[in-house]
Structures are given as structure tokens and as C-alpha cells.
Amino acid sequence: MTLSAGSFARFLLALLSIALGGCAHAARPGCNADIPALFERVSPAVVMISAQSINPYRVQGRVTRIIGSGFIYDAKGLIITNSHVAFGRQTLYVTLDDGNVVPARLLGADPIYDVAVLQIPKPERGKLATVPLGDSEHLRVGENVIAIGNPLGLDQTVTRGIVSGVNRILPETPLSLSEPLIQTDTPINPGNSGGPLLNMCGEVIGMNTAIVPDAQNIGFAIPINLVKSIVPALIRDGRMIRPWLGFHGTMIGPEVRRVLKLTLTDGLLVEVIEPGSPAEAAGMHGGEVEFTLGTLSLLLGGDIVTSINGIPTTEAAKIAPVMRALKVGDKLTLEVFRDGETRTVAYTLPERPLLPGDLPEEQAVLQQPTPSPRHDKP
């Protein structure tokens, strides 16, 4: 995957990570089953997903085919996988553990969190194998984990490793992956996307979603607690309904101001205003001049938000609950520092549409402003 610029959503999720705390918890006792036994028990619930999409704007290379993984978590035929595997595809088929290939229907997808839910028909005889969803909050760095999936189309492949880190916020990640992730050295490859990362009790504690291509065995999984929190909305609404702030940036404090030697104030430096957003309509200004020093990279010249709904933006832990509570239709009131003066900017939050940066490049040209996956055909 190609890594690109960050976003305000990453900032919000970083605050969420801080607010929730990153302390380690003891793993559940008794999670010491051997890998062959785990594989035998869990692998029947892991499926291969074959998808195809067609780009009508190309003369050549119009058809994109993808192989991914997923796992059945409900005997009614509900499957969790990555959005980048399933969203926007014209055809979706699922290969079960017994070799049967069945059509799948996309119930809902969220490209920002990169989670999707599929529905397959229940078998006429017998029942579908399922895998239990665990608790990712209780992960410890160094804990043993395994991944089951279909790397490069090699079905039902198991690999082992450990949890290398938790609450990883990747600094240069596409918006679709801007969330606190589990880092693992468990080997995962293209085709593992959407497959389960399991603890030694055989519970899903993460969904494999990304790798660093130039590294060796640095992979990332979406915490299962995050997945569980949004799956009901995907089934109910077909998408995640979230408010659109329309800007993103970086928090600055005394240390940054000393480096820059500019007349600034502490707060959230607005670097980018999203086109067509309520922030643009309200007259907010983004950055215009790039400044880079070591690992520090800023777009200077934009507004500095000093408070959000009356809460100062100088303490991340205090902002996080305010941002989590925002809903479509709420009024957002910002105190903004610009050109040595402070002014108030207020606007009502609309639903955030699907933006080009939310999707991989091969999908972005095919999508509508907001996803409506319930209308996709299997």
C-alpha cells in the first residue's frame, strides 16, 4: 500500500486513544491452546472473498480483481471483512471452508475505519461455523497471536507471531486506516486483508488490514472492539453516519512555537480545509506555507483553533470526549486565532460525505459522495 498524508480524523482518534488510555491489561487466563488445535477449531469460520470491480473510465486495465479474507461471526451468515476488499465491487463471492462458493451481499461498509459486513445465504443443511469475538482492550505487548487467511490466494494459511505494539497511530497513513491499530510481527500478506488475528483462546482480537511493504513482518490489525462498535450501524444504516467538521490540522504548544519563532498561540493549527465543507463555507483558513524540521512538518498560515464548544484545545484528554459526542445536526462553536485577533466561528454539522482520500485510488473514481452499499448486488 502507498502511504499518504494524514488527516484531522487521525488527530481525533489519537485523542480517543489518549482518553481511553494505553495501559496494558492482563490477558485472559487459560489462553494457551496449541496452534494445531486452534486452527482446527477456528479455520472453518475463515473464508476467502473474491471480488471484482470495473472502471468504466479506462480503456485498458478496466477490471480489478481482488482476493481477501473474512470471518463468519454469526450463524445467520454474517461476515466481517475490510471495506477495501468489498466496498464498490460489482461482484462478491465467498469460498467456504468446505470449498463451496456462494454469492455475498454487502450490507454495509465504512471506508474510513476499513470495516465491512457481508451476508451469505444460510446453508440448506447443517449450520455455518462461527468464530467468537474477543476483547482487544486486554491485549499485552508480547502476547502470542495467530493469523488465518488467504495470502496470495493460498487458502487457509496460518501464521504465528506476537503483539508488537498497541494504539499505533500511523503518521503517514491513508484516511481509511487512521485509527489506533494493533501492530504485530505475525506474517501477513496481500490476501490476508479482512482475516482474523486471534489470541491463544481462539478469539478474534483484531482484523488484519495493512502492512509496511518495505519492512519485514510489520503488520497492523484493527482492534476488534472498534469493529464491534461500528458493525451494528453498518447493518442498520449501510454506513457510518458521522458529522463533518471539514478541517484538520496539528496541535501546537510552547515547544513548537519556540522552534517557529512566530507570533502564534497554543491550540489546533488548521492546516487543510476540505473543499465544499462547512468549515470552508464558514470562512476558515487553512495553511499555505510548508515548514519542515526533522520529523516536524506543518502547513503554516492557517487559523489556530483555541477552543471547541468552550473547551480549550491545549489538552488532548479534555477535547476527546467533546469530539466523540458530536453528532450530525449539532452546532459547532470555535474560538479561532487569526492575524493576532480571536474571533468566533460557528456552524451546524452536516453528515460527512465519502471523500476521495477515504478510498484506495482504484476505487475513488467509482464512488458516489456517500456510500449506499445496501444497493450493491452480490
Image: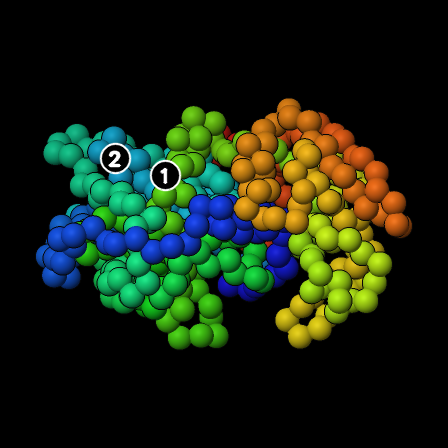
Q: Nearer the viewer, residue 304 or 283?
A: 304
Circle 1 sits in a helix, a strand or a loop, which is it?
Answer: helix
Label 2 amino acid? Answer: Asp
Mark 1 belongs to which amino acid?
Lys
**Residue 237 % position (x, y):** 47, 27
> To which residue does mark 2 refer?
74
In the image, residue 36 sits, relative to residue 97, either above or below, namely below
At 87% from the left edge and 45% from the top edge, which residue is drawn? 341
Query: Residue at the location (58% across, 48% down)?
Result: 316
Q: Which residue in the structure is indicated by mark 1?
A: 228
Please state, as top left, top right, bottom left or bottom right, where the C terminus lies in the image. Answer: top left
Q: CA distance from mark 1 to mark 2?
A: 12 Å
Instruction: Where is residue 342? Give x, y as percent.
Output: 84, 42
- Local crowd at mark 2 within 10 Å, few (<14), some, or many (≥20)? some
Marks 1,2: beta carbons within 8 A: no
Task: Residue 117: give x, y in percent of width and height.
Answer: 38, 38
User: Neighbour class for label 1 at 10 Å: few (<14), some, many (≥20)?
Assistant: some
Is 234 positioned to the left or the right of 46 in the image? Answer: right
Q: Residue at x 74, y 30 (%)?
A: 347
Q: Secondary structure at mark 2?
A: strand
Query: Horizontal placement of 357 versus 54: left or right?
Result: right
- Res 369 seen here: no
